[in-house]
Image (spheres, rainbow, N blue to C red):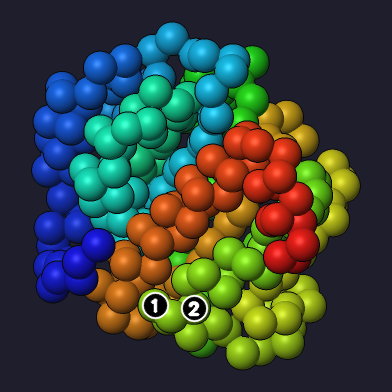
Amino acid sequence: MSKSAIHPDQVRDYRLLMQRWHDLVKGLHGIELSIFGEAGGYPLMVVETENWNPKAPSIYLSAGIHGDEPAPVEALISWAEESLKKKPLYSWNWQIFPCLNPWGLERNIRFDAEGRDLNRCYQSRKVPQVSDQLRWMKRRSFDAAVTLHEDYDARGFYLYEIAAARPHWGESLCREIDAVMNTDPRHKIDGHSARNGLIRRRITPTLMKGHPEAFLLHFCHAKRTFTLETPSEGCLSDRVLLHRKFIQEIVKKVKLSVASPSKTATLRQEI
Ligand SMILES: [Zn+2]
């Protein structure tokens, strides 16, 4: 995985992003790109496995729900261009939302064209693009779900792990990626206790008004849910690299967890 200079304008060009995903999917057997809705005049993409195989690992990935967080959007496409065609990944079950707020991405604005924070709308049925996305996700279940974000207040990267399946992966995931970027040293992040960049949360359906995407994934779709945050003011190439490395580590963990019991035991000892 190489680190190269990335121009911010390139990252914000949604037409170019769609083209890259189209070009990638053209060469992938069994993975297709669909338009699942429209928002602010932009078509919304989902890239997913055509015929879901219940025996194969399954992963959900999303980026760009906040338009002023470009690194995850670039990281997702550049990771996919490098990795998705490789064996055995193309035969896994994927549901990927490459950019959930293209209107915001092109304008460097957190909110959508109607001024909504889409990541507080997953309980609402009045936001068409969220309802369209939820319909697309219906009956899908994932070994791991990852939502990729950035934060202007962050002083390094940090990771939310919603506590569900054990052994937890949060600590070792942070260790695997902290060579790329330091963890956020704060002990309180966004009002939550943090340790070495990790925030492990137990959540209830009434905890947060409006529901972020990660809550919905946790309650309805995923065994494990992670939200990675990189510092918005950091070097763009480093932020992209960190998100890519994180996706790679998630893939490794999922691969191990569905492999032999002995490997799972090793993982358990590690944590
Ligand atoms: Zn965000």
Q: Residue at position x 76%, y 56% from top?
A: 268
Q: Is residue 116 above or below residue 58?
A: below
Quadrant for the C terminus in the image: bottom right
Q: Residue at position x 32%, y 20% from top?
A: 31
Which class describes the residues within 10 Å of circle 2: few (<14), some (14-19), or many (20+)? some
Furthest residue toward top: 51
Q: Does the residue tagged 2 have its C-beta within 8 Å of any atom of ligand 1?
A: no
Which class describes the residues within 10 Å of circle 1: few (<14), some (14-19), or many (20+)? some
Q: In the figure, residue 242 lies in which quadrant?
A: bottom left
| Spatial CA span between label 1 and label 2 | 5 Å
Task: Tally the numbered discs.
Answer: 2
Are circles 1 and 2 on residues that touch, CB within 8 Å? yes
Seen from the viewer's position, the closer of residues 238 and 256 is 256
Which residue type carries mark 1? Val
Which residue type carries mark 2? Asp
> Where's residue 269, x and y in %?
77, 62
Q: Residue at position x 28%, y 28% from top?
A: 43
Left or right of 126? Residue 20 is left
Seen from the viewer's position, the closer of residues 153 and 171 is 171
> Where's residue 181, x and y in %?
42, 81
Quadrant for the N terminus in the image: bottom left
- On the question of residue 88 being in view, the answer is yes
Q: Is residue 129 above or below residue 173?
A: above
Q: Secondary structure at mark 1?
A: loop
Left or right of 29? Residue 19 is left
> Where's residue 190, x and y in %?
68, 75
Q: Which residue is mark 2?
A: 178
Q: Secondary structure at mark 2?
A: loop
Left or right of 12? Residue 131 is right
The circle on residue 180 is 1
> Where's residue 252, x and y in %?
50, 49
